Image (cartoon, rainbow, N blue to C red):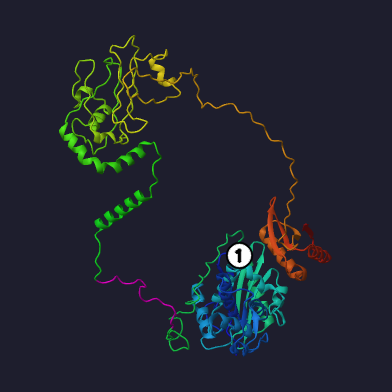
Amino acid sequence: MAAPFAAIVMDGRTGEVLYEKNADARLHPASLTKMMTLYIVFQEIEAGRLSLDTKVTVTKYAASQPPSRLGLKPGQKIAVRYLIRAAAIKSANDAAAALGDYIGGDHVTFAKRMTKTARQLGMSNTTFKNANGLTAEGHLSTARDMNTLGRHLFYDFPQYYHIFSRRTADAGIAQVANTNTRFLDSYEGADGIKTGYTAPAGFNLTASAHRGSKHIIATVFGGTSTANRNAKMAELMDLGFGKAKNNVAEQPPEAAPLDDALIASVETGIDEIDAEGGAGKTVRVSGEVKTSPRPKARPDVPTVADAVAIAMAEGIDGALAEATAAPAPAGTLEFQAEAMEGAVPAVEPEVALAAAEQPEATVEVAPVEPEAATVEVAAVDPAVATDAPGSFEAQAAALASGAAPAETPVADLPPVDAVEVAEVDPALAGMKPKARPEGMTVQLATIEPVAEPQAPAPEEVVVAEATPEPELVVTDPGTEPAAAAPETLLAEVTEVETVAAPATVGPAPVELAAVVPATKRSAPIFDAVETVEPAAAEADEEVVVVMSTSGGRHFGVNVGEYSSRYEAEKALLKTALAESATLNDGLRKTTQSGGAWRASFMGLTEEQAELACRRLSARAVPCETVGG
């Protein structure tokens, strides 16, 4: 009884169906099944879980498959690349089964993944039971589904698609020949892809061909012989090229997603319930996490309030900062403040007592003109005097804010030449003033020229002098000033020297720095420095040595220029098939220059390029060597 016939013709660029007959009838696909096996192998390679050099151990099941066979033995190790060649070109059943067992673990699990991948590609009427297509109950597909699979192989894995057009190949343990050689050689533009035959299926073929800008993919089920099948395919191809439109934009199909290796074969509801390894099988994934790995909180553990924790942290940070802070340099206000802080506890009671007994203090200063000078008061330790009225800190704050002296709590000065100075408490004699508050400003006295001093023997008084460098010095206002105008004194003074007051009463000399006339400059003053340019050293000749990583394969063969990229790729494919002995290691490359597409084989040695060009020239194929 003849196998049922089915056929479909599709525009490969868009997926448009141009002709169909019984396209959805579920029939035996035979070795067209191996297209799905290879599709999953290519998926695994792209996912990095497999490589062309991976060694596969042949199982007893794979080695027991009937012809067509590569001749594998149980326990034999063979590279994936050889199994791909044997399955795609020779249609070897043992090679396809070995690939399926290696990826899925066994043929049943791998068949379930094949069916799952078919669903992802839109093959809704296909169910697989094995990796090679031998007749099995429930192992069925349709012409439409197989045509869809062939189109996906063309678009999803173009880097591997050329394997279906190779006439012969080395399969490791044998040289294999293509089962589709007759159609590839007889039909113009044919480039693949797979044949199939079993007695229940008949002679099947999925083929692809290019002519001009058109691409046709067709599938035939149920041919009565190889010749009958090829003749029917040629007829369908001609029909497709006649109906296909020119200059149609390509619409590549969406590739199937790459599944996780642990769950790729777990698919329920696509097979019969009672089938071996079907939906009723329980699959357990090792390492599945069912509970949270986080530990539970300890019971009955007292917690610290947030406010308390923050305060403790701030206290610890402050103590650490104080302990690790570097001491201030000697002679600075910070150094004096630190030294005074260390002395405060010892004298604090006496200072407080002295302040209680003497609420008001007067200061005796040399007679000055009412508008001749501005008095500066140093800041005092808060332990001695606070912001209470009459304290030094209050006076300093008043002076800093620009208030009139009359508004300060200091006692009014009597209109006499000098007022008496109250005796300084001994407790204050050994104290040093703290640093000025940031808000205080320092005012320099404006000295007015005075013909003669109004009072005899003016005094210079130093308040709370503790170091050789006092903080507060009042100098004699009657000293003869410099000839320069008072307004420009600050701008022209280049150096100031502080002089300690003498211990005895008498004329107090004041040393002023020499006033140097300065010219206006808009940049800092630097001494002229004579620079000498170093003698130019003779430039050493630098030699750069670059090691080639191409292994000398920087030559190529150009086989002509074409009007379109398609024509250039087609010429490369035909040339590679015609001269595979010398161009097998070459990389096919198309480049556009000046509106034309150049077709070249690159990555060859000079000897390979010259030999290939000579052989092509002998076949009347134009070529030229490039590179070097």
Residue at image x 57%, y 59%? 249
The part of the image, by quadrant, that contains residue 437 is top left
Quarter of the picture containing the C terminus is bottom right
Amino acid type at mark 1: Ala
| Residue under label 1 | 244
Give residue 377's position: percent from left, percent from top: 28, 28
Q: Is residue 338 above or below residue 109?
A: above
- Residue 125 visible in the picture: no
Q: Position of residue 466 (x, y in %)?
A: 32, 33
Between residues 392 and 157, which one lies in front from this camera angle? Answer: 392
Q: Residue at x 15, y 33 (%)?
A: 357
Residue 520, magenta (yes or no): no
Horizontal relation, residue 549 to residue 394: left or right: right
Q: Position of residue 378 (x, y in %)?
A: 29, 30
Label 1: element kind: loop
Q: Which residues are magenta?
A: 283-299
Occupied quadrant, residue 193: bottom right
Looking at the picture, tell me which residue is in the foreground, 200 or 275: 275
Quarter of the image that includes the N terminus: bottom right
Q: Residue furthest front?
A: 504
Is 135 situated left or right of 211 in this image? Answer: left
Between residues 574 and 419, which one lies in front from this camera angle?
419
| 285 part of magenta stretch | yes
Label 1: few (<14), some or many (≥20) within 10 Å? many
- Whole-percent x and y of residue 62? 60, 87
**For the stretch drawn in magenta, what is the main secondary structure?**
loop
Residue 502 appears left or right of 16: left
